[in-house]
Image (tube, grey):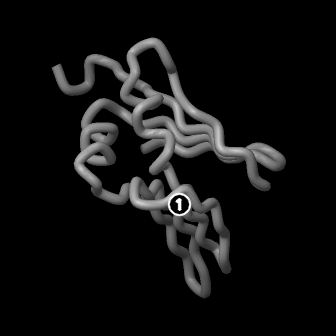
Amino acid sequence: MKVRFTPGRVRARIDDLELAALTRGEVLETRVEWPGGGWTLQLDPHTDVLEGRAGSLRAGLLGQLSTLNDPAHEGVTLNGPPRVTVEKDFGPQHG
């Protein structure tokens, strides 16, 4: 998963294997830690909740999985704050 921050917005790009994992019910997590702190983003297929706490953001995708799996859609947006966009980034990386 690739993550980008802009003011008021988080953008996550997932590949085909990560979308398959979400579809199987697996929570995707990316994390960066530093001395005294850190940050975590979870994409959770079991809830529709968007919540943040102390360096952690959980974006629930339960109601969005069918749209993410639809080839006609490139992604979904959860209205926050923050606004969270999850986009498919399918390339030849797994070919």
At 42% across and 44% down in the image, what residue appears?
A: 1
Q: Residue at x 26, y 25 (%)?
A: 93
Q: Which residue is mark 1?
A: 41
Question: Residue 35 in the image: x percent, y percent?
Answer: 56, 83
Residue sticking out furthest to the right: 7
Q: Quadrant where the C terminus lies?
A: top left
Q: Residue furthest left?
A: 95
Q: Which percent across, then down, holds residue 12? A: 54, 41
| Secondary element at tag 1 | strand
Q: Nearer the viewer, residue 19 or 14?
A: 19
Q: In the picture provided, is 29 more to the left or to the right than 94?
A: right
Q: Residue at x 62, y 38 (%)?
A: 85
For residue 51, side relative to residue 1 (left or right): right
Three-letter amino acid code at the position of disc 1: Leu
* Total residue callouts: 1
Q: Is residue 15 above or below residue 70?
A: below
User: In terms of depth relative to the viewer, which is nearer, 13 or 77?
Assistant: 77
Residue that appears at 27% across and 17% down: 92
How many neighbours does mark 1 have within 10 angstroms: few (below 14), some (14-19), or many (20 or more)? many
For residue 73, above or below residue 61: above
What is the x, y in percent for residue 26?
Answer: 29, 56
